[in-house]
Image: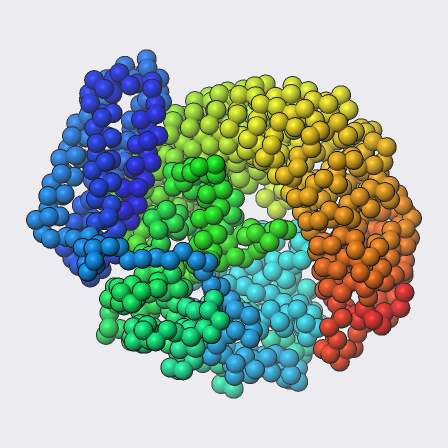
Amino acid sequence: MAEMIAISLSAKVAAALSHNAAVHLSALVAIRSGIAAAARDLELLRAFLRFADSRCGADPLASAWVDQVRDVGFELEDVADEYAFLSGSGFVRACANLSAWFSLSGRLRKARLRLRDLSDAKERYGIRSAEAYSPNGAAVAVVSRKLAEAAHFLDEEEIVGFAAHRRLLMKWLTEDSDSRQTLVAVCGMGGVGKTTLVTNVYKEVSASHHFDCAAWVAVSKNFTSEDLLRKISKELHRDVRASMPRDIDEMDYRSLVEALHGHLAKKRCLLLLDDVWDANAWYEIRNAFVDDRTGSRIIITTRSQDVASLAASTRIIMLEPLPAQEAWSLFCNTTFREDATRECPRHLEGWALKILSRCCGLPLAIVSIGNLLALKKTEFAWKNVHDNLEWNESSDSGIKQVSSILNLSIDDLPYQLKRCFLHCGIYPEDFPIKRKILIRLWIAEGYIEEKGQSTMEEIADDYLNQLVQRNLLQVMLKNEFGRAKRLCIHDLIRDLILERSTKEGFIVFSRCPPALESGKKIRHLILDRYESDHLPVPKMTLLRSLNAFMSDMDSSLLSRFRLLTVLNLWFVQIDKLPSSLSNLLNLRYLGIRSTLIEELPLDLGKLHHLQTLDAKWSMVQRLPPSITKIKSLRHLILYRRQSADFRYPSPGRPVVFPQGLQNLTCLQTLKYIEADEKIVKSLGSLKHMKSLELFGIHESILVHLASSISKMSGLLRLGIVSRDDNVTMDLEPFYPPPLKLQKLSLTGMLARGKLPSWFGCLDNLMQLRLCSSEIKGDSVRLLSSLPRLLHLSLVNACNTKSLTFPEGCFPVLKKLSLHELRNLSQLEFREGSLVHLNVLSLGRCDELTEVPQGIENLIRLDKMELFEMASGIIEKMQDEEASEGDHEDSRRTIAVKNTRWHYGQLLHDTIYINLFTVQT
């Protein structure tokens, strides 16, 4: 953490010294040069800080020294931020604050003197750097190569040590003929592989025909029965959100139980409750799961044998640490997974056995240390890893051993990855982390620096991918391109982050005012479901970021932290931001996503350092004219909700943008704004644009839009929505076309019923959505040759009566969605077509009454989704529903999910058909 302060300060100094408004004043009191000199001194200490940080737990002297250096680093950071704040106020106001400048100068002198004394103390007390412990004086060599997959997310055949347990669990779930509702418990200490085993089985079983519905829910320590029931209900409705009870977030316990009763009636359900700490978690929700003799199964993973005893003794799996042989196999598979033999070299075997013995057979520990050692090639490097594994040897719980190993994995991160990773501790337990938001937060915090031709966003994305590869971040959901969309942190690793951060006052979680102590040197404050008592909040002058999640708070609180860099509000029920918010001159990130805020401060333009304004699903209708003064703005996300009810954000509406958009030349993301001629012309100045969504397009501005987009050489995502059904969009003049486009959405009638001729040149296009386009068959054929198209969605896009997909068409397409094609009566897939298609979605194609011809030719098809389709096609598939034997034995059996409206309710069911036996 102390090393992070040095790095962060270096970045902040570079930014602070770029201000010219108060150069002469700061030179007068020697602040400008003093800050730069202090940053250089701290930079020289970085190598010592890196080593001492890793030795803090075992070396009290190093720990005390690091604590003091950290305090000086914080003070210097405060001086740099105060410098930026005073400089940002303009020359006239800076002159009026002359006393503040002299005060700042005094603080700087004291901090530099302390830093000089600490540097002397380092030599006096013999606190040496990591290199000093190397026989040859060189740092431990780290070989860069791609990290292996996490062992706890390996494929079935690669999981080590669980084969017998897996077979037993599969038997209990799929072969047990007992129709009674049965609990199954998987118990073991933290890191022993409970979630690994159960997840692997759950994925296979839930995808099969054995259960009508399934839910996988992580149970937090601080659960409430209502929250847990809501999570289960939402998971059961995951595929079709519209069928979820509309008022689910407002339901009380009784209503939630009754709703689940109705949904689960006569269904065989598989429920996984992961990481249960208290038996009350089951006692308080079991009323929702009536045993109607359908053979439902509830799986519980827990560290507690008391919780495991909820299940019958014959339905408990106790996971123990791996025996020596299986532990060695897992270690080698992880550490040497890229070697053909996956065997440990003889010269490393001695250290390998010593390190492995200290992992105590815990799979999480073995995988973590294996991933670390995969980067080390020398015997000395392995010895260094062994020597730095510190934990309490007398501990019999094993948790401290795992923590030490995981801490070592964190310590081994390069500094640029470490500061980004530790920042992930701001998220509450089990909170899904959105990739793009996380990247923008890292940039706002100053953790990312541009390098070469890469943007900060590209560098941050690479850092995120490295953390995923190191298995420190886990991917929960991928987007259409196979990239991480939502992530999470393993509970044990999150605990390690919080242990480090809270001990140093770096991060503080709070749910009630008593936790906010004015004496704490808090840098990042997280309000997680915070309930305010509206008493005065203590002054926290060091605060740099405030993140609030589903919290009750007074809006006046937001302007109390004058050096704030990040203000991020999620589901916070305030309807107005204080006008004093515009005095937070250091603010770089302002997030009001999913709030009731209706307007932004008129002086928002004073926030000259603001990089991201995220107002998606807020109630902001228009932006203040001063926003065009924020030339540093990189990401502007605007999409207003029409209802104050958090349960119903859709349909959203675009936001009106004032004149002067051309001034925001750093913009990379602009969503979702109302377009007019002036706005469209202004877009031509935004040459760094990568993601653009426009509403209200009409014929008279298309020519200007073509000109503007032609100047956006790096455009990756584009969305265009016409003003109304009478608008005809002629895209032929879009030349040169945006050849780097990966995602395109067009809503509106296309001229001549054709896609523009340049469409075939979009070799990078991966996702395409055409809505109300009225295209003809020729355009579909044009699309079929796009080499990288993964997802095609046609919504009311053509009036053709038949669609035939010939051999070789859509070579990589994975999902095809055909909705509201009112005249489509014949759909045919010929042999060799859509050879990689996984999902076929058909909706409201009223004339399509027969099963698509040649559907058996879709050799990779796994799932069909039907939405309000004609009864004929449904009945045909139901007649040919696969028997249990067919489903198990044939790889050509697919799931068909049928969704329909019935008396105001959205219902859905799933059947299984064999593609070779279904009649066309």
User: Residue at coordinates 29% horizontally, 28% vertically from top-left?
Assistant: 82
Residue 102 in percent (x, y) is at: 19, 22
Residue 327 in percent (x, y) is at: 40, 77
Which residue in the rendered view is the most extreme toward the bottom? 314
Residue 132 in percent (x, y) is at: 18, 55
For the residue pair 559 and 142, the one nearer the viewer reads as 142
User: Residue at coordinates 85% horizontally, 36% vertically from top-left?
Assistant: 753
For the residue pair 819 and 467, the one nearer the viewer reads as 467
User: Residue at coordinates 16% horizontally, 49% vertically from top-left?
Assistant: 65
Q: Is residue 108 above or below residue 919?
A: above
326 left or right of 881? left
Q: Quadrant of the C terminus?
A: bottom right
443 left or right of 269? left
Which residue in the rendered view is the most extreme toward the left? 124
- Total of numbered circles in the picture? 0
Q: Is residue 291 above or below residue 606?
A: below
Which residue in the rendered view is the most extreme toward the top? 92
Residue 703 in percent (x, y) is at: 73, 23
Q: Quadrant of residue 106?
A: top left
* Residue 562 can be seen, yes or no: no
What colour scheme does the image use? rainbow
* Residue 782 can be seen, yes or no: yes
Q: Quadrant of residue 707?
A: top right
User: Residue at coordinates 83% horizontally, 54% vertically from top-left?
Assistant: 805
531 left or right of 883? left
